[in-house]
């Protein structure tokens, strides 16, 4: 059986693996590991920076919404103060109207309770009981 198709050749001639080749391979491997660790450290640093940035934005958002809530509460308070003042004014007007009605009702009641003055006789002659026609 022919194994030549299964043999991989990277160089035209075969080279024996000696200390220099081993050292070169180790140097390449260590360089590859160093680059990987450097990229990994860079990725970790970027991730931490993004996390700090998100945390800062979140804090800014919360502060903004707290300020908006304070402004909303103040607006509501002003509206309620104005509403209560208007309501108080209307209640006072209603109270005065009821007092006036009660005073008028009392005056009317006093007039009704007064004994009627004796009717004055008029100088007109009264009709006599005469013949009926």
Image (cartoon, rainbow, N blue to C red):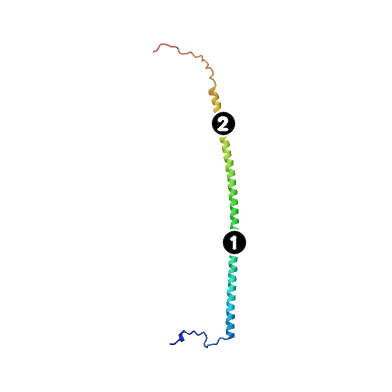
> Regarding mark 1 in the picture, which secondary structure is present there?
helix
Q: Which residue is rendered at x = 58% and y = 47% of the image?
A: 76
Q: Which residue is mark 2?
A: 100
Task: Residue 4: give its label.
Answer: none
Q: Which residue is mark 1?
A: 55
Name the residue nearer the viewer: 8 or 62.
8
The residue carrying pointer 1 sits among few (fewer than 14), some (14 to 19) or many (20 or more) residues within 10 Å by Cα, namely few
Mark 2 or 1, closer to the camera: 1
The residue carrying pointer 2 sits among few (fewer than 14), some (14 to 19) or many (20 or more) residues within 10 Å by Cα, namely few
Where's residue 48, x and y in %?
A: 59, 66
Name the residue nearer the viewer: 18 or 24.
18
Quarter that holds the C terminus: top left
Give how far apart the Cα atoms at labels 2 and 1 are.
Answer: 67 Å
* Extreme residue in the bottom direction: 13
Where's residue 120, x and y in %?
A: 53, 16
Quarter that holds the N terminus: bottom left
Name the residue nearer the viewer: 74 or 56.
56
Q: Which residue is rendered at x = 58% and y = 39% of the image?
A: 88
Q: Earlier in the sequence, mark 2 or mark 1?
A: 1
């Amino acid at each position: 059986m022919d194994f030549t198709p299964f043999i991989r050749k990277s160089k035209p001639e075969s080279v024996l693996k000696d200390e220099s080749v081993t050292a070169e391979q180790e140097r390449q491997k260590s360089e590859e590991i160093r680059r990987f660790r450097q990229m990994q450290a860079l990725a970790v640093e970027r991730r931490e920076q993004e996390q700090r940035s998100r945390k800062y934005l979140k804090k800014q958002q919360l502060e903004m919404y707290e300020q908006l809530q304070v402004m909303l509460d103040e607006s509501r308070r002003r509206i309620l103060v104005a509403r209560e003042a208007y309501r108080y004014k209307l209640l006072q007007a209603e109270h005065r109207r009821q007092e006036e009605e009660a005073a008028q009702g009392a005056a009317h009641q006093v007039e009704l309770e007064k004994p009627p003055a004796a009717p004055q006789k008029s100088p007109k002659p009264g009709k006599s009981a005469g013949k009926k026609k």
